[in-house]
Image (cartoon, helix red, strand yellow):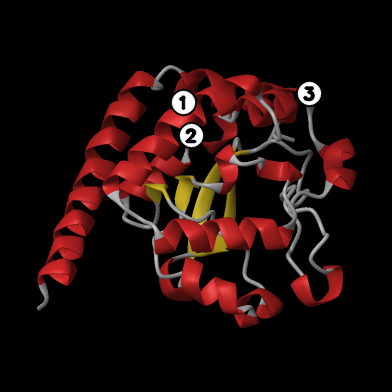
Amino acid sequence: MKASNKGQVIEGYFKRGSDYVFAVILLFIFFPFFIIIPLLLKFICRDSPLFVQKRLGYKGKEFKMYKFKTMKGGAASGEKNLQIAELGQKARFYDHKVNSAITPLGRFLRRSSLDELPQLFNVLRGQMSLVGPRPFMPNKELRQDPLYGIRSSRLPGITGLPQIKGRGDLTIKEWLLLDARYVDNWSLFFDFKIILLTVPVVLSRKGAY
């Protein structure tokens, strides 16, 4: 094994270990929210507080991603079922037309990104990382895009380069290009930088819908 490849393997193990440790720490810090938010959702929505959806993970393998429910009844996620071939490069990643289905509490959870907290359990299960390409929904056209093959070579993440570069205001093509850029330039330092830059972005709520 070449020295550079060996170094990448070691960094990969360190990334997985740090993901696990920080996920446990964050679960401890945000533990009160895992009690308060489900109780509020149960009381307001009269439904399961957890939203579970199939997503594409590492090397295209499907897994169940967790979120706090933000929409009425059985409404689908606010993300488009990406149809790149039909929507074209100017299509936005988020479908703003679904906003009418979002509950007032759900809107707050989305704007504050608190709806993403259950994904810490995906991190503990090894299905996601703290930083990586955002997991998309299963889609035939998406799998055929050359950029998807690049982004799927890394575990999907709770945050990533698109999250600090525009989030929901990005086009689908811009999102894919930023994910590919992340994969090509990945390092532990790059992950650390993205995590630090995610904090002010989340607090500003810019691009969150």
* Residue identifier under label 3: 104
> Residue 157, how many percent across, how many down?
45, 50
Label 3's element? helix
* Residue identifier under label 1: 34
* Tag 3–tag 1 contact (CB < 8 Å): no
Categorize mark 1 by other alpha carbons within 10 Å: few (<14), some (14-19), many (20+).
Answer: some
Query: N-terminal of the two: label 2 or label 3?
Result: 3
Residue sitting at x 75%, y 43%: 169
Identify whether 60 is placed above or below 154. Answer: below
Horizontal relation, residue 192 to residue 69: left or right: left
Identify whether 40 is placed above or below 144. Answer: above
Residue sitting at x 56%, y 72%: 148
Quadrant of the image occupied by residue 167? top right
Task: In this rendered view, identify the residue nearer to me: 194 or 47.
Answer: 194
Residue 136 at least partly seen: no
| Three-letter code for the amino acid on which mark 1 is drawn | Phe
Categorize mark 2 by other alpha carbons within 10 Å: few (<14), some (14-19), many (20+).
Answer: many
In the picture, the quarter occupied by the N terminus is bottom left
> Residue 163, how many percent across, how many down?
58, 41
* Tag 2–tag 1 contact (CB < 8 Å): yes
* Residue identifier under label 2: 117
Identify whether 110 is placed above or below 54. Answer: above
C-alpha gap between disc 2 and disc 1: 8 Å
